[in-house]
Amino acid sequence: MSTIGIIGAGNIGSAIARILARVGLRAIIANSRGPASLDGLVRELGSSISAGTREEAAAQDIVFVAVNWSKLPQALAGLPDWKGRIVVDTNNPIEAPLFKPADLGGRLSSEVFLGLVPGGRVVKAFNHLGSELLATDPTAEGGRRVLFYSGDDQAAKAEVGILIERLGFFGLDLGKLAVGGRLAQFPGGPLPTLNLVKFP
C-alpha cells in the first residue's frame, strides 16, 4: 500500500486526515507551524495519523496538498524534486473571508499548481466539496458520495481512484486536467459544491 502525506492541516487537510483515519489508513500530516502544533488533532484521530515535518509529508508516495491559495508557493518552496510521486491538488484559487477569486492570468488553477511541484504527477481531487461534508461518512445517504478526479497521468489517476474507493466514495474520472480541472475548479466550474450520491 502506498504511503500517504498531507501538507496543510486546515479545514480540508484535517478532513482528509479524518477520512483516512476512519478506514485505518496511515498518513503523516504537516503544517507551517510544526508537528507539535498538531498534537491535539493527531490525538483525536488516533494512531494511524501522525504529525511530521513538511519534508516528511512530501516524501510519501501520495501527497495531498491542502493549503490556502496565496500560501501555496511558500508551503511548497524548497522541497526536493517530486521524482514521479503522486501529488493530489485539493486547492481552489479563492480564500475566506472575502472569497475573491485569484487572478490566474487565464490559466487553470491546476496549471499554476503544476509549476509548484516539479516532477510530481498531479491529480486534481477532493476540492469540490466543503470540508464538513467531505469529512462525513460517504455512505451516510444510502449510496456512495461522488468524488471527481482528473489528471494527465493515467497510472497516477488509477491509484488515486483506488484510494477514493477504499475511503468509501464513488470516484468519477473527469479526464485530463485541462477538462476535469476546469469542470471542478471553484470558482468557475459547474461541479463544485454538488453533493452527488451513487446508489447501488
Image (spheres, helix red, strand yellow):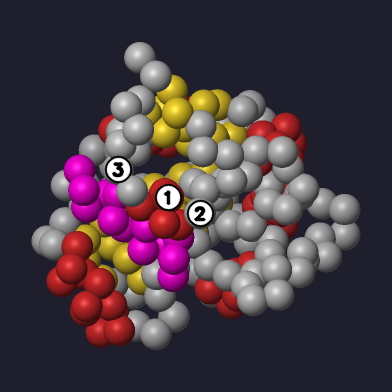
> Dot 2 lies on which element?
loop
- Residue under numbered circle 2: 130
Q: In the image, is residue 83 part of the stretch drawn in magenta?
A: no
- Residue under numbered circle 1: 133
Q: Amino acid at mark 3?
A: Asp
Quarter containing the N terminus: top left
> Dot 3 lies on which element?
loop
Q: Position of residue 150 (x, y in %)?
A: 59, 34
Q: Position of residue 70 (x, y in %)?
A: 66, 74
Q: In the image, is residue 19 part of the stretch drawn in magenta?
A: yes
- Which residue appears at 30% of the width and 37% of the height? 140
For the record, the magenta segment spans 10-23
Residue 86 versus residue 59 in the image, above or below? above
Residue 4 versus residue 153 in the image, above or below? below
**Badge 3: few (under 14), some or many (20 or more) residues near its Cα, within 10 Å?**
some
Q: How far apart are labels 2 and 3 at the CA level?
A: 14 Å
Q: Are marks 1 and 3 in contact (CB under 8 Å)?
A: no
Q: Amino acid at mark 1?
A: Leu
Q: How far apart are labels 1 and 3 at the CA level?
A: 8 Å
Quarter containing the C terminus: top left
- Which residue appears at 30% of the width and 84% of the height? 37
Q: How far apart are labels 1 and 2 at the CA level?
A: 6 Å
- Residue 53 vs residue 93, the one in the foreground: 93
Q: Are marks 1 and 2 in contact (CB under 8 Å)?
A: yes
Q: Position of residue 15 (x, y in %)?
A: 37, 57
Q: Main secondary structure of the magenta part?
A: helix
- Residue under numbered circle 3: 137
The answer to whether any part of residue 75 appears in the image is yes
Q: Quadrant of residue 177?
A: top right
- Residue 170 vs residue 60, the one in the foreground: 170
- Which residue appears at 25% of the width and 72% of the height? 41
For marks 2 and 3, the one nearer the N-term is 2
